[in-house]
Amino acid sequence: MGKQSQLDFEGIEQLPLREYAERAYLDYSMYVILDRALPHIADGLKPVQRRIIYAMSELGLAAGSKHKKSARTVGDVIGKFHPHGDTACYEAMVHLAQDFSCRYPIIDGQGNWGSADDPKSFAAMRYTESRLRPYAAVLLAELEQGTVEWVPNFDGTLREPSLLPARLPNLLLNGASGSAVGMSTDVPPHNLREVAVGLVKLIEDRDTSVKQLARIIKGPDFPTGGELVSPREEIVAVYSSGNGTLRVRATYTVEDGTIVINSLPYQASGARVLEQIANQMRAKKLPMVEDLRDESDQEEPTRLVIVLRSGRVDASSLMLHLFATTDLEKSLRVNLNVIGTDGKPAVRDLRALLLEWLDFRIETVKKRSRFRLDRVNERIHVLEGLLIAYLNIDEVIRIIRREDEPKPVLMKKFGLTDIQAEAILNLRLRNLAKLEEMKIRGEQKELAAERDRLQKLLGSPAKLRSLVREEIEALAGEYGDERRTRLVEREAARAMAEEQLVTAEPVTVVLSERGWVRAAKGHDIDPESLSFKTGDAYFCAARGRSTELAVFLDSTGRAYSLPAHALPSARGQGEPLSGRLNPPDGASFRGVMIGDPQTPWLVASTAGYGFFVRLGELHSRNRAGKAALRLRPGWDVVVPAPCPVSGFPGDARVAAVSSGGHLLVFSAAELPELPRGKGNRILGIPAGKLKSGEEKLVAIAVLGAGDSLVVRSGQRRMTLKSEDLQHYVGERGRRGLVLPRGWRNVDALDAARG
């Protein structure tokens, strides 16, 4: 094998990988921050936006010109100034033209430039046409007046402005957003008139505080309107720190039983809002809404109609719910992080931001005035030479006719400068009339007055500030408009309770022996006729409404709650409660209750003890439930019984039957009402641990005045009317009387109302 040639690293810089990677990442991040993502405080533009506006001005696309294809502009931008993707460049251009994105749009577009529902639905650049709007003059008017630094473009063949000489703080007026490496910016748009008044206030008193400024610039003013509902102190805090969040919500009116939404939060989509509301309707969570319509058109860009089911619906409560659950209210981030006049990004408060822009503007006016003063002096100098020529016109003509090189002769003869001599030689014959002398002297007088004014202006900071103030006020009068976003402090949006959002339908909650649950619509179904899984069977049922909580009792005496509307449908065989709740190991479910929270229910143990409890006392959102009925070892829970709606406890009676067939009826007033506990004795069953084969309480019922008692034994039913029950009436705690032969093996007792 031959010798391997050694690599020659001479002249090549060698760096540790860590140092190289760190430097490369920092270079990249600074490029993204300064040359792509963050706007400059001076003109409020990112480089691509600045280049688009400048390229359009160079193409002659001023406000009064004809529109040209957008592809022409994009081609010029990426070919001359911004060597990046045409798609990204066109998107930036579209943003400057969308009146729902910019508070004061800079580009006037023809064709499809997107919609508020889908800002990126704009047509391709080959289809759309564009030109600048009148507002663009705020950025471009002083461009050729020595106000900005010109830099070479990317390939050094052209010049471009490093900034535009904005005559208003476009950054605050149109806002900006962007994400760089390790930092981002979110500047909301503001109202021009308010910002102008704030600037005037700062010109008069630089010590004006943020709090004082916030009384003038009351908050952002979004192009889509809406309401700024953040409290005043929150807005002041955002302006003081330079970052935070503000809440903006839609505005609406109520017209003939319908809610009409006529403005949306900034960057919210009407189609998305309607979809969010429709999803809730499909989930049956908005029973008070009958229909949705989008009636937006060219005259009313936002008109979303919500049709209510009846005039009794509280529109304000419904809207508070929709504000909390849809994009009808949005929290918008504020982060006043921009590149300053020192070329460094930083977060500024409102006062610092406006002061820095004012300093930039005053310096721009100084540069403009100096530039104009130089031009005036140059012209005066030329006019002085022309005047000498007119006063000695015959001699000047003689020298020009006879001399081969008249310029140096003229300069020597009349003491002219090179510029003056060149101006004389460039005179046209038609300008040699005697009248021209008068014009020159008149122009000299005007220019001298202008020179004196400019010199005084440049020598007086007070006059400079006064001029800046006058120009800002004039521009506010020309381009300013009324505020679109209202400032109203509103109560916080809150979602309605789940029960309020469910249609109040009658339901029957069915519990099986193995603890499977389901809810059937209506009260007229026979729960025992439903199909059950193999090895399972019907255990008990309770009737209520879909807006209520169903309460389940387990064999340890604990109570659990689940919304009735969330239970599985009776079309199937249900679901095991153990999948939704966390009962103790070995516990089984022994009863179900549903109804108004104030409805009393009778709960009892197989040992013969029980009490009345208001259903609301048993409600618990905890999956592990809450203690309700206190039991001793060997005791179990009897299926609870609802109480009559009226006449409780005065006219109500308790019916209880034991496993031995003993039935006792007594006044409901003899049992206490408790939130939890063991209760009092119902039937005369010996206390203590129940042993297998011992008599126990098996069923209970609460009867109203005139109610009958249905005794169930297997598939058989026996009805005892009110007069029949007199035979079994006794005192609470007695053993009761035995039922007729053949009816002593009782499964359940039911109250037949009325």
Image (cartoon, grey):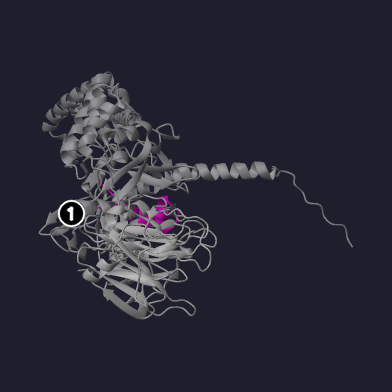
Q: Main secondary structure of the magenta part?
A: helix
Q: Is residue 633 magenta?
A: no
In which image quadrant can residue 513 be found?
bottom left
Whether residue 272 is visible here, answered yes or no, is no
The answer to which of 475 and 496 lies nearer the viewer is: 496
Residues shaded magenta? 76-103
| Side of 377 where 474 appears, left or right | left
User: Is 96 covered by the magenta stretch?
Assistant: yes
Q: Secondary structure at mark 1?
A: loop
Q: Is residue 461 visible?
A: yes
Q: Position of residue 265 (x, y in %)?
A: 27, 50
Q: Nearer the viewer, residue 561 or 297?
A: 561
> In the figure, 445 relative to 544: above or below?
above
Q: How far across and how far down the image is residue 671, in percent? A: 32, 53
Q: Please state which amino acid type lies under the numbered disc 1.
A: Asp
Locate the C terminus and report the quarter of the image it occupies: bottom left
Please indicate whether residue 678 sits to the left or right of residue 28 in the image.
left
Which residue, given by chain and number where applicable, does mark 1 sit on?
314
Badge 1: residue crowd in 10 Å (few <14, some 14–19, many ≥20): few
Q: Quadrant of the N terminus?
A: bottom right
Residue closest to the far right: 1
In depth, the one of 537 and 666 nearer the eye is 666
Measuring from the top left, give residue 430's x and y in whole percent.
16, 39
Q: Is residue 692 above or below residue 350?
A: below
Quadrant of res 288: bottom left
How many badges with numbers are in the image? 1
Please give the name of the residue rendered at 28% of the width and 46% of the height, measured from the top-left corner: 248
- The picture places residue 571, in percent across and down from the top left corner, at 36, 77
Q: Quadrant of residue 119?
A: bottom left
Q: Nearer the viewer, residue 346 or 248?
A: 248
